[in-house]
């Protein structure tokens, strides 16, 4: 790719950034820039997309890891949650199985994990403490991204198959939960003493992150004038997050955090921009600066 094609986004010329069709990426960014911030919305996954996969090489916590690694949770929870993850995570990552084949297994995983959490008598205060002590971390540059979307009132939907209460707490402790941000995820239910008694609504798992999971809200309908969408994800399931939205220009940005050799070709097919083993949000911020006409030094 000629470097000049991306003079507007220097980050896209870096060697860990891959694009199957750089011309499409360039045209889409140019169109989004022309259309301006009033046409833009962002839909992002949380775990390992807005949050780090690794920090200086050390693996960081996902929402579920926050519980599994905490001193607060009982040993039986940790042991059983690990057995579940060792059973089902390889299925999630197995590219030889179709989504249809994987879906029943994912429902089993989430159902069993939620049942297990219910047996632990955790409280809302425990959640705050567990997040504070965890090594769940927002990516470097996430604060910049969140602040600038907020400044221009660009909606940010965080769509996660993780745990909403934990996501909200990570964001509140490490950044700011602005009113242009909405989290759609699995939210815990607490009784009036603050004890966790289950989960609200239907399970959101890795392969139903689509309009069905937010069908009860009119989120995308209210935003149908914002038909330029930046999608950020790290899993192939994340590609469905914008189903149900009005789309004119869509730029799909994928973080490939692990199994790079095996997955790069597939990720390049599915995502327009693939960012390999990067602990920051710098590439996304570079694209955002171009779209919003923000000088690159800011
Ligand atoms: P995401 O959609 O926010 O990326 O989060 C989903 C991830 O959570 C997915 O990779 C599977 C993982 N997970 C666990 O680690 N433990 C669990 O108990 C469950 C249900 C999911
Ligand atoms: Mg993820």
Image (spheres, rainbow, N blue to C red):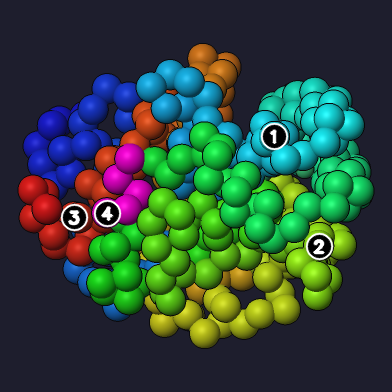
- Give the extent of the magenta segment: 140-144
Query: To which residue does mark 1 refer?
Result: 71
Residue 195 image label: 2
Q: Secondary structure at mark 1?
A: loop
Vertical position of residue 222 compared to residue 122: above or below: below
Between 85 and 268, the residue placed more toward the observer is: 85
Q: Residue at (56%, 82%) from the top-left corner? A: 221
Residue at disc 4, secondary structure: helix
Instruction: Using a 10 Å C-alpha cutoff, classify the residue at mark 2 as few (fewer than 14 neighbours), some (14 to 19) or many (20 or more).
Output: some
Q: Residue 75 in the image: x percent, y percent? A: 83, 30
* Whole-number angstrom distance, CA of label 3 to CA of label 2: 46 Å
Q: Residue at x 75, y 24 (%)?
A: 90
Name which residue lies at 76% across and 67% down.
194
Separation of marks 3 and 4 at Cα, in angstroms? 14 Å
The residue located at (45%, 54%) in the rendering is 173
Residue matched to label 3: 290
The image quarter containing residue 192 is bottom right
Q: Quadrant of the N terminus?
A: top left
């Amino acid at each position: 790719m000629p470097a000049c094609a991306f003079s507007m986004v220097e980050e896209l010329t870096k060697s860990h950034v891959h694009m199957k069709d750089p011309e499409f990426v360039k045209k889409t960014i140019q169109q989004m820039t022309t259309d301006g911030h009033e046409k833009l919305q962002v839909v992002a996954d949380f775990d390992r997309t807005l949050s780090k996969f690794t920090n200086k090489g050390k693996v960081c916590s996902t929402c579920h890891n926050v519980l599994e690694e905490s001193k607060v949770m009982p040993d039986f929870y940790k042991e059983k949650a690990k057995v579940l993850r060792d059973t089902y995570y390889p299925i999630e990552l197995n590219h030889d199985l179709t989504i249809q084949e994987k879906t029943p297994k994912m429902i089993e995983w989430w159902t069993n994990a939620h049942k297990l959490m219910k047996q632990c008598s955790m409280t809302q205060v425990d959640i705050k403490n567990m997040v504070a002590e965890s090594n769940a971390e927002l990516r470097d540059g996430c604060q910049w991204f969140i602040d600038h979307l907020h400044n221009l009132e660009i909606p940010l939907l965080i769509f996660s198959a993780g745990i909403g209460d934990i996501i909200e707490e990570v964001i509140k402790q490490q950044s700011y939960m602005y009113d242009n941000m909405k989290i759609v995820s699995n939210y815990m239910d607490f009784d009036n003493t603050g004890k966790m008694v289950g989960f609200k609504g239907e399970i959101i798992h890795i392969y139903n992150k689509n309009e069905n999971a937010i069908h009860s809200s009119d989120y995308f309908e209210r935003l149908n004038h914002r038909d330029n969408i930046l999608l950020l994800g790290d899993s192939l399931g994340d590609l469905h997050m914008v189903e149900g939205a009005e789309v004119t220009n869509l730029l799909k940005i994928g973080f490939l955090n692990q199994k790079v050799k095996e997955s790069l070709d597939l990720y390049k097919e599915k995502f327009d921009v693939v960012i390999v083993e990067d602990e920051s949000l710098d590439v996304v911020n570079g694209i955002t600066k171009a779209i919003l006409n923000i000088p690159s030094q800011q």
